[in-house]
């Protein structure tokens, strides 16, 4: 099996693919005004997605995560999962979602071959949840997470963006969820993007604060597995699930980078917060272009940056994460 490495010797095997830039939520740190219908560009079709993922699979990518915008706003999301799951070499297909359609599609996604589901859920308090997301569907989303576990999707994670105002009681409710269910609840430090500067200044909560709280509650940091990516995992005896911290502002965060991103219109992004964008869509028109597509991806690796420059307040081209897929 072929492997793809960048100029710093990092082996890349994980593709994050945005399948739409549209979203039905208005998260305060991401798309506070929601997304306007007119500006949305035509996303890659199922056929284009399949060609793209085949090329990455030929380069040794075995892990693919679909994201957005909100991927479940695409009516063919289950068909897209099914297509990707059938590509030789892809052994793990995941989806990141705000949970809007979760309960109704959990078992369909599982049958389509989905192996990993990440639900973004920043608060368990209905009012706070609505203030953050503009949605009043908290109860449905919580039910959807439980439905996904019950449906037997092998990995179910809840991603919580850390925001000032999260009280200890809420932290404890998230942790309590992992006592009963084999869930991973991961706390993610808010990142500054081109558009959320003011919100970031007011709401950024350093991951270090949560780390101290977890350790004070007896959670124990686990050995990092090389395939884990950037999350630090914590466990506690008597709990079926686990907790995690993703701290993009910590030193060395990018050293274990194993991923590439492709936007919903087929632009290869080498770093979430970088400037480089390599258009691939013109190479997705026919199966005969596969060799050229693979060469284009390979040759881009020389310019994948060593690390993001978030600590210097630089977020590259990234206006918000809905456009690049988070
Ligand atoms: N709409 C889907 C969702 O919310 O899960 C998928 C796309 S969303 C951009 C992917 C993830 O990025 C979500 O977990 C979201 O909370 C996170 N995210 C968005 N903007 C962020 C920011 N500025 N800092 C940290 N995480 C962010
Ligand atoms: Fe939509 Fe996800 Fe951004 Fe929230 S974080 S606005 S759900 S894309």
Image (cartoon, grey):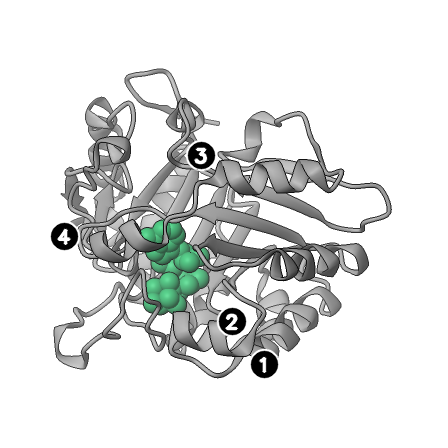
Whichever of callouts 4 and 1 sits on the residue coming sooner in the sequence is 1
Asked if residue 213 lies left or right of residue 292, the reply is right
Regarding mark 2 in the picture, which secondary structure is present there?
A: loop
Q: Nearer the viewer, residue 151 or 33?
A: 33
**Quick check: 185 above or below 58?**
below
Residue 286 lies in what quarter of the image?
bottom left
Whichever of callouts 2 and 1 sits on the residue coming sooner in the sequence is 2
Q: Residue 282 got which mark?
A: 4
Measure how far apart labels 4 and 1 are at the Cα level.
40 Å
Q: Mark yes or no: residue 3 visible.
A: no
Quick check: marks 2 and 1 in contact, CB under 8 Å?
A: yes
Q: Position of residue 61 (x, y in %)?
A: 44, 37
Seen at 45% across and 26% down, the residue is: 256
Asked if residue 90 lies left or right of residue 151, the reply is left
**Quick check: 163 above or below 108?**
above
Q: Label 4 neighbourhood size at 10 Å, few (<14), some (14-19), many (20+)?
A: few
Q: Residue 99 got which mark?
A: 2
Residue 108 lies in what quarter of the image?
bottom right
Measure how far apart labels 4 and 3 are at the Cα level.
23 Å
Residue that numbered label 1 is attached to: 140
Q: Nearer the viewer's eye, disc 4 or disc 3?
A: 3
Q: Position of residue 316 (x, y in %)?
A: 17, 41
Whichever of callouts 4 and 3 sits on the residue coming sooner in the sequence is 3
Seen at 17% across and 50% down, the residue is: 194
Q: Residue 161 got which mark?
A: none
Regarding mark 4 in the picture, which secondary structure is present there?
A: helix
Residue that numbered label 3 is attached to: 13
């Amino acid at each position: 099996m072929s492997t793809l490495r960048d100029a710093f010797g990092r082996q890349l095997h994980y593709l994050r693919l945005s399948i739409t830039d549209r979203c039905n939520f208005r998260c305060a740190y991401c798309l506070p005004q929601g997304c306007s219908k007119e500006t949305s560009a035509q996303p890659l079709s199922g056929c284009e997605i399949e060609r793209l993922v085949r090329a990455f699979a030929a380069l040794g990518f075995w892990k693919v995560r679909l994201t957005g915008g909100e991927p479940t706003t695409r009516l063919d999301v289950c068909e897209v999962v099914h297509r990707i799951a059938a590509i030789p070499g892809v052994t793990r297909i995941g989806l990141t979602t705000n949970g809007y359609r979760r309960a109704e599609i959990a078992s369909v996604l599982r049958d389509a071959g989905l192996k990993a589901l990440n639900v973004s859920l920043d608060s368990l308090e209905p009012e706070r949840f609505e203030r953050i997301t503009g949605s009043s569907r908290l109860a449905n989303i919580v039910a959807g997470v439980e439905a996904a576990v019950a449906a037997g999707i092998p990995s179910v994670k809840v991603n919580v963006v850390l925001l000032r105002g999260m009280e200890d009681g809420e932290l404890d409710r998230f942790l309590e969820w992992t006592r009963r269910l084999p869930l991973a609840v991961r706390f993610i430090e808010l990142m500054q993007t081109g558009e959320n500067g003011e919100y970031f200044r007011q709401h950024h909560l350093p991951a270090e604060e949560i780390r101290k709280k977890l350790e004070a509650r007896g959670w124990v940091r686990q050995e990092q597995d090389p395939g884990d990516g950037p999350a630090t995992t914590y466990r506690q005896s008597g709990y079926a699930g686990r907790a995690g911290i993703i701290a993009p502002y910590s030193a060395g965060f990018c050293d274990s980078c194993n991923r590439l991103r492709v936007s919903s219109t087929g632009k290869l992004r080498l770093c979430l917060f970088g400037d480089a964008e390599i258009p691939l869509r013109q190479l997705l028109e026919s199966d005969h272009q596969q060799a050229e597509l693979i060469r284009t991806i390979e040759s881009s690796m020389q310019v994948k940056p060593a690390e993001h420059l978030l600590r210097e307040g630089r977020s590259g081209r990234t206006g918000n994460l809905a456009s690049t897929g988070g």
